[in-house]
Image (tube, rainbow, N blue to C red):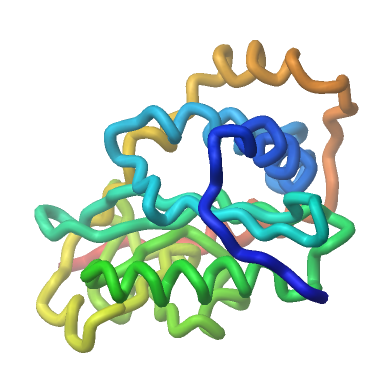
Amino acid sequence: MRLEIRREAEEDFRAVEEVTREAFWNLHVPGCDEHYLVHSLREHKDFLPELDFVAVHGAEIVGSILYSRSRVEDVMTITFGPVSVLPVYQRMGVGSALIWHTLSLAKEMGHRAVLIYGSPDYYPRFGFRPGKHFNIRTSDNMYAAALQALELAPGALKGVAGRFFESDAFEVDVRASEAFDKGFPRRERRATGTQREFQKIASMREPYKG
């Protein structure tokens, strides 16, 4: 499949929010907040517009990736997410193309490390390793299977240990999200098997005993 990976433009905003809603609806929880997160993240101080990209097939936006600033204690890092792909185009390499493209660009820009919360089965293909490998824990000081870290510069996380803090942009206002969602076609919120898998991964945590 031929894809164009390019920067998101202002005229893409609504289409990207629609793609994100389609990608995440009922995936992790009944309904989703990710399209509102995309909408609000663009105006947040931690947003990195230079790493805001879309994947286009023909004339259609089929995927999106956004980045924000994060940190491990006082060491600055970056984080990507949401990464969204229209369901009909999933498992076709769209998400991988967005991730590879932006990781390479982030490295060229001088960013040294990327930390995310994501599937421990999916992200190692991009070079991510468990946060525990670097003695990096969640903000509540736990080792979490979903916390993944990638050095963009060799040794960037050597000696960097402690708690990881993503941007407070990810602390979504549920009421604001629900109000925002009313501007989209109504969809049923329901429980799914993917939600159970998400909860299983989220529960894979162990206390730090240092």
**Label tally:** 0
- The correct choice, above or below, for 66 with respect to 112 in the image is above
Residue 98 in the image: state x and y as whole percent. Answer: 58, 66
Q: Tell whether 207 sits left or right of 176.
A: left
Residue under the point 55% across and 85% down: 125
Residue 197 in the image: state x and y as whole percent. Answer: 71, 59
Residue under the point 23% across and 82% down: 153
Instruction: Identify which residue, 90 or 203, lies in the foreground.
Output: 90
Q: Tell whether 65 sits left or right of 153.
A: right
- The correct choice, above or below, for 100 with respect to 166 in the image is below
Residue 87 in the image: state x and y as whole percent. Answer: 83, 55
Residue under the point 42% across and 52% down: 67
Question: Is any part of residue 18 visible from this angle?
Answer: yes
Question: Is any part of residue 195 visible from this angle?
Answer: no
Residue 164 in the image: state x and y as whole percent. Answer: 27, 55
The quadrant of the picture occupied by the N terminus is: bottom right
Instruction: Identify which residue, 4 or 208, lies in the foreground.
Output: 4
Instruction: Identify which residue, 57 or 168, lies in the foreground.
Output: 57
The quadrant in which residue 180 appears is top right
- The correct choice, above or below, for 53 with respect to 2 in the image is above
**What is the residue that sits farthest to the bottom in this orientation?**
154
The quadrant of the picture occupied by the C terminus is: bottom left
Q: Tell whether 161 sits left or right of 147.
A: left
Residue under the point 56% across and 20% down: 174
The quadrant in which residue 26 appears is top right
